[in-house]
Image (cartoon, rainbow, N blue to C red):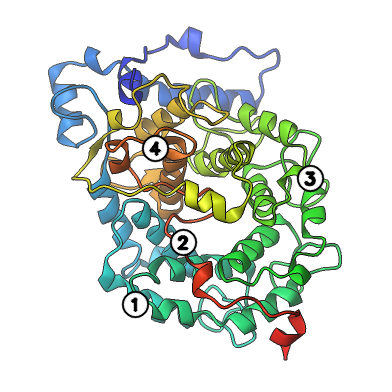
Amino acid sequence: MCTARLAASTSTFAMSELAAKFDVETETTQLQQDTEKEVTPFFIKLDGLNDSQLRHLRDVGLVNETGYDVRLLREKHVKYLLTGLANLSAGYSSLDASRPWIAYWCLHSLDLLDSIDDDLCPRVVSTLRSFQNETGGFGGGPMQLSHGAPTYASCLALLLVAPRCPAAYEAIDRPALYKWFLAMKTPTGGFRMHDDGEVDVRGTYTIVAIAALCNLLTPELCENVAEFTVSCQTYEGGFGGEPGNEAHGGYAFCAVAALQILGKLDMCDVEALKGWIARRQMSFEGGFQGRANKLVDGCYSFWQGGAMAVVNAAENGLSGFDSAVNEFIPEVGSAGDAVDVSKTAEATPSAGGLTFDQGLLQRYILLCGQHVEGGLRDKPSKMRDYYHTCYNLSGLSVSQHVLSEVSDRQREILVSLVPFHSPHLSNTTARYAPPPPHHRTACQ
């Protein structure tokens, strides 16, 4: 049974059967029950709809014309994402320090949809170059403080457009960036997010990932980094932002990806980690929650699903950064206005090599995550946004491609995603000279 037909044939649960049974009713349990009720209509049997209801779904493009297969609204998503790379409304002024992130979310999503326009690339380079500081790193905008998060987003956005606009490679001031990385490093092996800022595994991942892509991953930079990261693993099996914190999907991905890039994933308790991630997949909704006793959210399709993909890839012998990059990138076919989800897999929802239900995750993303006008969201009651569009599509790509059989038809759905970063960055490191023999060389 294909993924789409699974979705089409999912029965509508009676509310009495749907409601989870709790010994003690709390605000948390009520919110969970409300969320299950919210998504239930999206799992209705499509072949049980009347003609007018089915016609509506076909008119908006969500269901194909000849059957009951749910479709990825590619062209609508592309159109929505392009608005994020144009003039934004005044409502976005509160996100002024997140301008590199908006650029990255949109470009990464367009890359997954194989739809980056060459004409965009010079403007991306000129804009992001203005966010870079002479002392190294990128801020959220011109003359803003260098910070690990916008540095990560800026560098990835530049490297995404670099194959189309080679000036993007040179836009990153690598000597200054390396010096800034070292300045952010603490004796414990962690990294501050900014000067005098907090130390957590976000800093570890953002710096390690960009250092690897820019060929700056030196022994000096890596010293004690894995040890600090492992110290953030909790009794639950996941990772918190710093030692003693509650396990959280975003931090778990940062920790797992950083350890894998460093070749030190085996330093953590992998079995406990897998169990924690697997328990975060919601049994009814099919998507992931970020923490225990929280609600499903489409963005964790990648933060949790991607973390599991990194672990499962390592278990299958893809232990190095380069080997994982090479494994996860097939050729990408062209696609039309929308693509039938039936092309993703002709199998049961449990098909695939990942330790979670890949079919149920795709069902949640495609039925509950897609906005009919383009863009994706946390859950049906939430607004679409660029952040959730990026990470829903990323989770969809991981669940379709990583350690799964990929047919020619499947390649038309989404570009395959490397769990560490964007898909077309496999040759980036080779574009840069090797790192200096000792960090003092870069600091002079």
Closest to the observer, 418 or 205:
418
Q: Which of marks 4 and 3 is in front?
A: 3
Residue 302 is situated, as x and y percent measured from the top left of the image, at: 52, 43
Residue name at image x 67 percent, y 45 percent: 252
Disc 2 and disc 3 in contact, CB within 8 angstroms:
no
Which image quadrant is residue 43 in? Answer: top left
SS at mark 2 in the image: loop
Query: Earlier along the polypeptide chain: callout 1 or callout 4?
Result: 1
Residue 283 is situated, as x and y percent measured from the top left of the image, at: 54, 21
Q: Can residue 151 be seen in this view?
A: yes
Residue name at image x 58 percent, y 40 percent: 313
Disc 3 and disc 1 in contact, CB within 8 angstroms:
no
Q: Name the residue under label 3.
A: 267
Q: Mark 2 points at which residue?
A: 425
Q: Name the residue under label 1.
A: 123
Which residue is most to the right?
187
Q: Mark 4 points at which residue?
A: 369
